[in-house]
Image: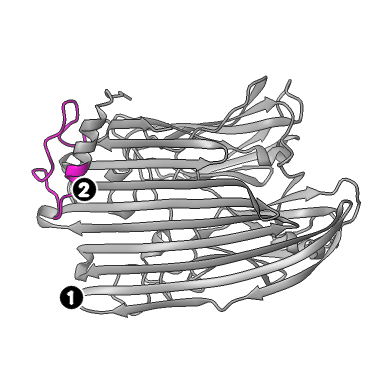
Amino acid sequence: MKRRIVMSMLAGATLLAGTLLGTGPAGAADVPAPAAGVPAEFGTDWHDPVTAAPPVERPSGKTCEVTLAQAQFRDFTPYRGTYTPPDGCGDRWSKVVLQLDGKVKGRQYDRLGYLHVGGVEIFRTSTPQPSPDGIEWSVEKDVTRYSDTFRTGRDVEMLIGNVVDDTYTGVLDVKVTLTFYQGRPDGKSPDRVLTLDGDSALTTPRNSERIVAEVYATGSGGGCEEYWYLTVPEPAPYSCKAGAGPYREVQISVDGRLAGIAAPFPTVWTGGWSNPFLWYVIPGPRAFDIKPITYDLTPFAGILNDGRPHRVEVSVVGVPEGQTGWSTPVNVLVWQDEQRARVTGKLTVHKEGDLANSSVHRPGSEHRVDTEGAHRLTVGGYVDTSHGRVTTTVSRSLANTSTHRWTDGETRDALEAAWRDDESVTVGGRMTRTHRRYTMDGTTTLGAGDRLRTVLTLGDRATVVGTHGGRRTTWSRLDNSYTGDATYTANVPRDQRHAVGTTSERYRLYGSRGCYDRTLTAVQGVLTEDRNRC
């Protein structure tokens, strides 16, 4: 596709302020005159998708590359192939990096995809929506923790379910590679990567001393669970209803006993909030690289290490009984005690607080649903290893508040929501505290002349502090903020939409390992700002 000249940061800042400070539904005459080189509205071509997230750090030294999958997705037929370990880089690596390169043109929805190697899900993603002239995009991910999976030949399965017909013409053409960096491993990767069998059963090695489950949880499938944060309880008059309301919580259990809780990230896909023009250049946080939820199951190691299969199940609180719409594949990462054939232990603490989940509908000319949800869980246990007894305690506290307002006919639809997920993991004298905050504040309005306008801000924030003996040893602070304002004419052919939009993302990561701070701004599909502050 054609890449347009990057405009000055001043022009981008001026357009951003002018667009976001508007108050009513914006028409073509409501936006400021574009700076030189920026079109008055979206055309048939725009900048390739780009995010402000940092690239994967890559070490020096010898590398080997393996093509993992290469396919054109037109329907729901998975790509199937075979993975062979790299030749010439040994079987121990300092880093393994996955890269997806894709291209698509024409008309297409956003699509969800996964990639399995030997049954292990190593990547979950969604796709951008294309321009008529075509776009290309790339995603990279550190997959070093799956090194155990990559040491032997495995079956590969990849699917980005798609529909191609007379209307939706975009064929998703993708290639996925793995780059292996020969060198000494950092010792942080697990010794084994396991999956559950068809009965949700898990059998761990009997010498497991640390066990972590990761769940790639996504609300999807085209139904209301794709927008679970906007659902309302019965009998509120809204197009998406879901039992008790929008509170969602991803739980994992071991043999029927609650073992972990987490708040799902409110991912917005590239067609989200009824306005694809928000996402054409800058997607929302995590949309292309869906991060798994992690649960430290080490307190349950004494139970899991008995050599028998145990039932490990994932459920999502708030989904109406019998309703589908969530995908929750599970990987289990295991670190083993090389000096012992059997590691014994015991679960010593299991304290679950009451689950609070309240959604109250207040009818009127503007309907309103106020939601409050919260939950706490603490689990603890020990394992007797070759280096002594190790006690692990995991505490997690969740909270969600949201206010959803809409008018009859949903011509105005607004949500202000916040999620908190606080976790502490104590192992011996070491403690890691993680404070996660997710926010969403948006309004969609359908005004005169069917001009549909969406104004939206998203936040993905986390603070991690490690201590030993009460002294801070490591720390990091993430603040990934997205803002967008886009307007188009609804219910008309694509070439009559007269769409305008300004979007911006600032990704800041500070900590004991350094600083990263990048801002991107796009106006009418032109990248007008790319600024690094560190």
Nearest the eye: 100 or 198: 100
Which residue sits at x=27%, y=24%?
Answer: 4
The reply to whether dot 2 and dot 1 touch (C-beta < 8 Å) is no
Magenta part of the chain? 17-44
**Which part of the image, by quadrant, shows the C terminus?**
top left
| Residue 371 versus residue 276 in the image, above or below | below
Query: For numbered disc 2, what is the local secondary structure?
Result: helix
Instruction: Reply yes or no: does residue 33 show up in magenta.
Output: yes
Nearest the eye: 238 or 373: 373
**Which part of the image, by quadrant, shows the N terminus?**
top left
Task: Specify the label residue 365 is tagged with.
Answer: 1
Nearest the eye: 463 or 437: 463
Nearest the eye: 458 or 79: 458
Query: For numbered disc 1, what is the local secondary structure?
Result: loop
Residue 156 as seen in the image, left or right of residue 221: right
Tell me which secondary structure the magenta stretch mostly adopts.
loop
Residue 244, image quadrant: bottom left
Residue behind mark 2: 20
Give the residue type at disc 1. Answer: Ser
Which residue sits at x=32%, y=52%?
Answer: 457
